[in-house]
Amino acid sequence: MAQNGMDLSKEQMHVVVVGHVDHGKSTIIGRLLADTNSLPKGKLEAIKEKALKSGKPFELAYLIDALKDEQAQSITIDSARVFFQSSKRNYIIIDAPGHIEFIKNMVTGASHAEAAILVIDAEEGVQENSRRHGYLLGMLGIKKIVVVVNKMDLVDYNEEIFNAIVTEYSQYLAGLGIQPMYYIPVSGREGDGVVNPTSNLAWYSGPTVLNALDLFNKEKPLVDLPLRIPVQDVYKFNSYGDNRRIIAGSIASGQVKVGDEIVFYPSGKRTKVKTIETFNAPKVTNSLTGQSIGFTMVEQIYVNRGQIATRVGDTPPFVSSRLRVSLFWLGKQPLIMGKDYIFKLGTSHEKVRVDAIHKVIDASDYKNQNDRTEIGHHDVAEVTFKLAHPIAFDTSEVFPETSRFVLVDDYEIRGGGIVLEAVTDEDAQIREDVYTRNLKWIPTDVTMAHRAEMYNQRASIVVITGTRHAGRKTLARKLEKQMFNDGKLVYYLGIGSLLYGVNADLKRHDAPGGWREHIRRFAEVAHLFLDAGLILIVTAIELTQEDLDILKTVIEKDMVHVIWVGGKVTTNIEYDIHLKNRESLDEGVVMVKHLLQQRGVVFKP
Amino acid sequence: MEHLKELEYRSVYILREAFANFKNLGMLWSMGKDSTVLLWLARKAFFGHVPFPLIHIDTHYKIPEMIDYRDRLVREMKLTMVIGENREALQDKHTFPDGAVDRLTCCKLLKTDALRQTLNGEGPRRIFNHDTDRYEEEKNPEPFTGVIVGARADEEGSRSKERYFSPRDKQNEWDIAEQPPEFWNQYKTDFAPGTNVRIHPLLDWTELNIWEYILAENIPTVSLYYNQGDGKRYRSLGCYPCTFPVESNARTVQEIIDELSVGKFANIAERSGRAQDKDDGGGLETLRREGYM
């Protein structure tokens, strides 16, 4: 609306206005706009005229309730944005709906805000959504809160009524660890205390709503924290004649400069920043928090979307497939255990299940319940999640951006929350060993990229598993021979070949824990072959998903291709190809080669 | 300037999220200032490239300078340019300038319907062939699953309620009451087959921001925005039967910025020269629910 005339040199602040339905949020915003002369010419008159025609009394709230639906129902459906300015800064006001059905719109509006105005009706007092919105502001990480007690005109500007509401609400918020900065009595309709002070509230000596907003200071950027760049993408625009390989992402915290040694998680792979790339801008050698950047690397290590880059020496993010979180659920269907959802944090995207429900806070009264097996519509809960694959993340106190997540069910975002702590998962020790190995790895001048170019193939591992006597080894030998004849650098390694040599000290690999160590060593040996640029074919009987997880912790998970041989799949492993009977082995060779071509491991002969 | 950089970084982030998540991605380019800034932001995001097709819905009533400008940039920037149109309505002269229908129906036919058919791959599409240097009929057009659009929240009421990633159903319709939540920088990137998602990287930009950015980045814009000596210029571009120039002496980007920030347009809505807005009860909501940009 009234963006025109905004002074661009001024800073900007997003403010969300929340509160129970009909407590007067839109009226407060209308008053802020009208009394700061922020309305476009003719807008106020046009709305007054419209109200007159429809026979309804004019209300300031009409200004922002621009949608026809809303005027018909007289409630705010969505979070509208309006602009106004004070002498200090420009404000973008987000009007969030107070009606319970539209809580997801309130969250949408509030999650982009730096500050919040929470409106409580002086006559009705603290209501269900006053409590719910207060809780959600805390969850969303908004600390700059003004509580506005509106409609003071309806209670004769009575100081005791105001004080009673302040006492009740501040006690409730204190229980959640939230402390608003100001409580302000106003009348939006009469204009008391919103922009201009008033004699009607002579007993109140604090700031007006506008003063209170102006008293807030902008959050300092997180530039002094450790570096976090959630990788958005890896660009190589070869078809446009551009050979740069650019890692793209937004800096969630910290800073990065050319020459910095950086490390990506969960992989733990390291390289150096070669250049920071720009378009139509002067060359830069340093980038800061909040910037969307792209950089090239000295060594072309494997990087993909969802990883988090940090600087060597900075506190690294956590890596695990288990995390304890606090979340709120907006789905009409309850969030239940045993069902797959999608978990999105930073730029990562993983399948997730609820592993344990620790406590559920009921939406209507915000009392704890500790014996629940599902999380209902609008409930808040603490749970432990199990992800299908480990991701890199942070916990909430320090890094806001890399500790927030959403949950997707049936294509829609239906919940969100913050990570409270990393829970140790099964592969934590193996992962630590891999990070140490990467840290101590003695570098060479012949890189993976050089080898791939020279050998005309990308290093990969084909895991052939399945039931006994189904033809795993036959397939492996046929595939090795075929690829060898195609001129590929290929090697077949059966798991049994390691049992009595490399693993000779593990006398009882079938003892508890023995098998995991056996698989880990197998994976480390495979890692050597892959680092040498080979295509490795391995066979092992009836591998499980847990075995595969170890393999994918030790070596790059995108290098792994899984073939199941045998009529029935007898384990929980996720495979790429299933060969059902022996007769299909020749066909199987063709299928595997096709898969490798599709995935860019080898080119068509 | 700091503020413009903040807007740029957010828009670039959104564009990259769109590119990472949608296989069949396209961007609407009307040659107006907003979608041209969007085109520029795409080049920022992808380091000089625009790695997806641009889509123009040609009503055949666009001001000729717009078409010349479009094809000049397509050649200069080696853009993948796709053009859609409602061929049937145009052939049957079922338009407002032909006197057959009212303004809003004309908008629905030539823009909304044409857009829907272009996006779902059912309507005819022409694509620019840089080898032959002309537009050719696109064979087997595929549906777009993600469409980047230059809508700004400050333009009019219904646009102020948009999400950055906003789903459209199979009929390309927008369900305003049932929009998905959008937390922090997590957007709706999962979608059911047959549906598509509108992506709005410019939602937080104002008209003034757009011009400030055009100035800062020296972005080429169509000459119609500037007074060429007759004391008139276009503030908003559309079809010539329904879009009218405003009285203005602004000849340069800087003069436009002055006019918008302290001058005569400081408090007058941008789309005041668009006749169809008034016909829709002051908002574009009816049109936009059905898929209008």
Image: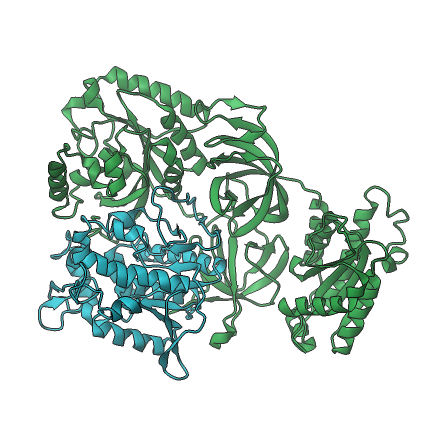
Chain colours: A green, B cyan
Q: Which residue is nearer to you in this view: A602 or B278?
A: B278
Question: With A602 as the anchor, is A170 left or right in this view?
Answer: left
Q: Quadrant of the N terminus of chain B?
A: bottom left
Q: Quadrant of the C terminus of chain B?
A: bottom left
As displayed, is residue B258 above or below residue A378?
Answer: below
As displayed, is residue A192 above or below residue A240?
Answer: above
The residue at the far front in this view is B92
Q: Position of residue A423 (x, y in %)?
A: 63, 39
Q: Position of residue A478 (x, y in %)?
A: 81, 70
Q: Which residue is nearer to you in this view: A227 or B244?
A: B244
> Residue, x 27% and y 61% (percent of image)?
B109
> Residue, x 89% and y 51% (percent of image)?
A505
Question: With A116 as the anchor, is A562 left or right in this view?
Answer: right
Number of numbered discs: 0
Q: Position of residue A68 (x, y in %)?
A: 24, 42
Q: Which residue is nearer to you in this view: A270 or A172?
A: A172
The residue at the far bottom in this view is B132
Q: Which residue is nearer to you in this view: A305 or A197?
A: A305
Residue A307 appears in the figure: yes
Q: Position of residue A382 (x, y in %)?
A: 55, 32
Write down the quadrant of residue A476 in the picture: bottom right
Question: With A160 as the anchor, is B125 left or right in this view?
Answer: right
Residue A242 appears in the figure: no
As displayed, is residue A520 above or below residue A421?
Answer: below
